[in-house]
Structure formats: structure tokens, C-alpha cells
Image: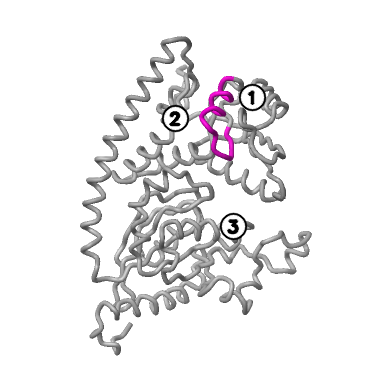
Amino acid sequence: MSKTFSTAPVKETAVLVAIVYQEQRNYTVEEYLNELAFLASTLDITAVKTFTQKLSHPDNSTFVGKGKLEEIIAYVKAEEVDMVIFDDDLSPSQLRNLEKQIKCKIYDRSLLILDIFLKRAQTAQAKTQVELARYQYLMPRLTRMWTHLERQRGGTSTRGGAGEKEIETDRRNIRNQINVLRKKLDKIEKQNATQRKSRGNIARVALVGYTNVGKSTIMRLLSKANVKAEDKLFATVDATVRKVSFGNIPFLLSDTVGFIRKLPHHLIESFKSTLDEVSEADILLHVVDASHPAYENHIDVVNTTLADLGVSNKPTVMVFNKIDLLKTEAQWENEGGIIDGQMTAEAMDAPNVGKVFGESVFISAEKHKNIDTLRAVLLEKVKKKHLTIFPNYLENETF
């Protein structure tokens, strides 16, 4: 009788590590670690345990204190864990010290996000951008044990002078790759800039928001296009643009990469060309997961990123999605009280919503609730822009 073997990939295991800073609330740290676990699962990595430590600042040598590090080492060894993931960026010296002592693969938040982007990227531009960002990030962090340039090589180590020579070779290869990728990206960006110039006679709308808030689902509903939508972080990495018409008024609708807290600096720099869809948009739809306990923090992260891109002054409609998941005040009371910062169902009708967030629409893309309201609000915005492009456009047209 012949044996059958599973071809499914074997999931790696990881422990998650985070510092609890002064005045930071426990539920905030828990939310951050849940997000980190979600990021790991996107790469088929299963988080098996979390470690936290209260510190005013990370240890310069090993990020966490000596006692906590010993706990982590003991657990990793006893449970044969594949890797340790830190929720903050590690300096090159911290990385070297941690790999030497823990003796397994070490990830920090930025590398995890970079690997996800590398997995998700589809177009030549996105792939080039991610590869460039990854090489720039890895350059100062090469060690004998760490070989993330090829994840399949795992945690192999090289000892002695041969290892040092291998690192120098890797550095030289990375520098060469960075130069090649920059030239390739410049060429792609020039081609895309030419394409964008040809769109000057049509209104442009961009969907922006924290990752996994439902932008792609909204894109699909508004454009009636077969756009990929998944309950995963960074399901969309490449900018997707579709031509849409509401009545007789056409416009371009783009779905852009979702933002996230502590987005790697190199990634933001490399993706600025992709985010040109946001920079050149006439109207922004800022999508928010209204049911998420940290929705206000997510809004702040997106607004900060938009400010960094110099586009925070664009006409914006706040689109609060997933209202079907909101609970009433009475339901929260029955479950022990409202979580600090959590939105309730009653908030949608509160008179101060517009004062706090600006023009807002509350929808459920999944349940197709209030989509007509969103269309009507968007049409008014697009119509106004359309008339600035075509001032002689007949206002008595049927829209």
C-alpha cells in the first residue's frame, strides 16, 4: 500500500514580544499584539505565545530585559519554536545579540510587513518597490545567522571567516541590486506618470484607509468590477484603478494599499509612486472599520500618513464601514460595559459626528446597507469636480 504525503505548507510557529510603555493601557497592548498575530498569520505563521514587559524604553542591547529574555529563550527551546517576532523595529546590534542568544529566526514588525508586501505584490511596479524597500532595510542588518534574503534557508548559520566573507558578498550584491532596482523603478514611474497625465480630463476618486477596513469590497460595489477582497491584512498592495459612471458623469476610482501603524519608512518611500493615485486624486473616501475598538487610532494613523504625503487638505468623505457589527449601548451594558473608545450603534445618529469627523456616511459594504447614500454623496462631489473640468456641461443632464 503506497503512502500519501500532504503537499500543504507546514506552518511555522512564533512567539510575539512587545514592550508595554508607561501610561500605555493593557487593552491597547493586547490590540497591538492581536494585529501582530494577524500579520504573522498572513505568512502562515502561527503565534503560540506572547511575552510583554513594562519598560520606559527598549534595552539597547536586547530590546527586553535580561530576565524576560531568559524566559523567552527557555520557552523557545522547550517548545521548539521557529521564530520570535518583536512588535517594534530592532536595531542591527539588537538583532545580532538576539540571534546569538535565542538561536532562532528573529523578525521585527517592519520585516514582517515587508515580507507580506513581497508575497502580495502582483504588478512589476509593486514588486520592484517592495524588493527595493526590503534590500534597503536588510543592508545594515545582515548577520551570520540571519538569511532572510532567502527565507527557505531558514536559520542556518556560518561560522568563522567564511561567514564574514559571505556577509561582505551579500552586502555587495545588495548594493548592486539596489542600484538595478532604482533604475528599473525610475523607468516604470516615468511610464506611469505619462499614463496619469492622460487622465487629466476626468475626476479622480481614491479609497484610502487602514488595512482590512473593506476598501476593496466598496471598490467592487461602486465599480461593479471583479476586485479581489479578502479578510486579510494587505489583501491589496497594487493600486487598482477602474472607470466608473454615475448617470452621465464618469470618474476614475482607485483602491490603494491599506495603511498600518509603524509602516516601515523604506516601504513608504518606495511606495510613494503607487500612492501618487492618492496624491493626484480630487476626492478621498477615507474608509474606517467602525466596529474596531481602535478605530480612532486607525483614523489618526491614516491622517498622519496622508499629511506625510502632503494630501491632507483634499475633499474627503469619511466612510464608516461594517455598521452591521456595531452594538447598541444596551447590548454593551449587558456584556459588562462599553470598551473605551468603542463606537456604538447610536453614534451614527449623533449630531456631533460631522463636527468631529467631517462629512460622514455610515454603511455596511458586506450587507449592502446605505450604499445608495454613499453613491449620492460621492456623486455630488464628483459632479462638482466634473463641472470645473467641463464648465459648459449641461447642468440639466440626467444624473
Question: Nearer the observer, disc 1 or disc 3?
Answer: 3
Question: Which is nearer the eye, 239 or 282?
Answer: 282
Residue receiving disc 3: 297
**Residue 33 vertical position relative to residue 155 in the rendered view, above or below:** below
Secondary structure category for the residue under label 2 = helix
- The image shows residue 248, relative to residue 304, as above or below, that is below
Nearer to me, 237 or 166: 166
Whether the magenta-drawn stretch holds residue 6 is answered as no
**Residue at left 46%, top 14%?**
158
Image quadrant in which you'd find residue 17:
top right
The residue depicted at 70 percent of the width and 26 percent of the height is 66
Point out the residue furthest to the bottom here: 396
Which label number is shown at residue 140? 2
The answer to the question of whether label 1 and label 3 lie on touching residues, with beta carbons closer than 8 A, is: no
Q: In the image, residue 94 lies at what x, y percent?
A: 57, 29
| Front tag of 2 and 3 | 2
Side of 319 relative to 79 (left or right) = left
Residue 287 position in % (x across, y down) = 49, 63
Q: Which mark is residue 76?
A: 1
- Secondary structure found at label 3: helix
- Cα separation, mark 1 vs mark 3, equals 33 Å
Amino acid type, label 1: Val
Where is residue 395 shown, x and y percent of the image?
A: 29, 88
Name which residue type carries label 3.
Answer: Asn
Residue 98 magenta-highlighted: yes
Element assignment for label 1: helix
Residue at x 31% of width, y 85% of height: 398
Check residue 369 in the rendering and tell me which mark sits there, or answer none: none
State the colouring used for the structure image. one colour
Label 2: few (<14), some (14–19) or many (≥20) C-alpha neighbours in 10 Å = few
CA–CA distance between discs 2 and 1?
26 Å
